[in-house]
Amino acid sequence: MIKKNTRIYLIIVLVALVGIQFFQPKRNTAAITSDHLFQQTHVPGNVQQVLNHACMDCHSDQTKYEWYHKISPVSWYINHHISEGKHELNFSNWRSISPLDKISLLEDVKKEVGSGKMPLKAYTLIHREARLTVAQRDSLFSWVEKYQEELMQEALN
C-alpha cells in the first residue's frame, strides 16, 4: 500500500512539474534604445564590460538568457530578481531620470558593489564573469565619481 501511494505521489509531482513548464514569464529582451545609459553618456569600454557582465541582466531591458531560464520554477525566481533589479535601477531608462536622481543611483551602485551586496552571490555562482576584481571595482568607482561630477555640473546649469 505504501509503495502504491508513493508511486501516485511521484506521478502527481511529475505531472505538476511538466505542467508548470507551460507557464513562463515574459522575457526581458528589448532592444537598446537612445534612452539607455550607453547611449546617453560615454562609458569607457572596461566599465561597459563590467556593467554588461555584472549588472545589465537585472538592471536593464536586455537580459541574456541561459538554458536554465526556460525551466519553471527557476524562470519565475529569475524573473522576480530581474523585476526587483529594474525597479531599483534600470539603465535602459537612463534618459528619463533627473541628474540629481542619477547621482543618487550611482552612489547606491558604489555602496552596493563596495559592500559586496551586488552583484548578488546567487548570480555570481553561475556567472563567474560577474565576480568583480579589485581593479574592476576601482575602474567602476572611478568612472562613477567622474560621471557624478559631470551630472552635478549639469544639474547646476
Image (tube, rainbow, N blue to C red):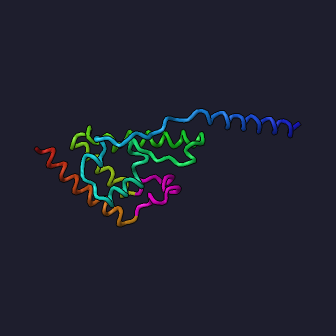
Task: Give the quadrant of residue 91.
Answer: top left
Q: Nearer the viewer, residue 106 or 15?
A: 15
Image point (86%, 40%), residue name: 3
Residue 118 painted magenta: yes
Q: Name the quarter where the N terminus is drawn.
A: top right
Outermost residue to the right: 1
Task: Tell me if residue 60 comes above or below residue 134 in the rendering.
Answer: above
Q: Is residue 88 magenta?
A: no
- Return the x and y of residue 134 as percentages of the image width and height: 37, 66
Residue 21's x, y, as percent?
62, 36
The residue at 25%/46% (across/down) is: 40
> Which segment is the magenta one?
116-132
Residue 129, position as x, y percentages in the image: 45, 60
Q: Quadrant of residue 74?
A: top right
Q: Image quadrant for the C terminus? A: top left
* Residue lying at 22% horizontally and 40% vertically, measured from the top left: 98
Position of residue 54 measured from the top left corner of the image (x, y, whole percent):
41, 54
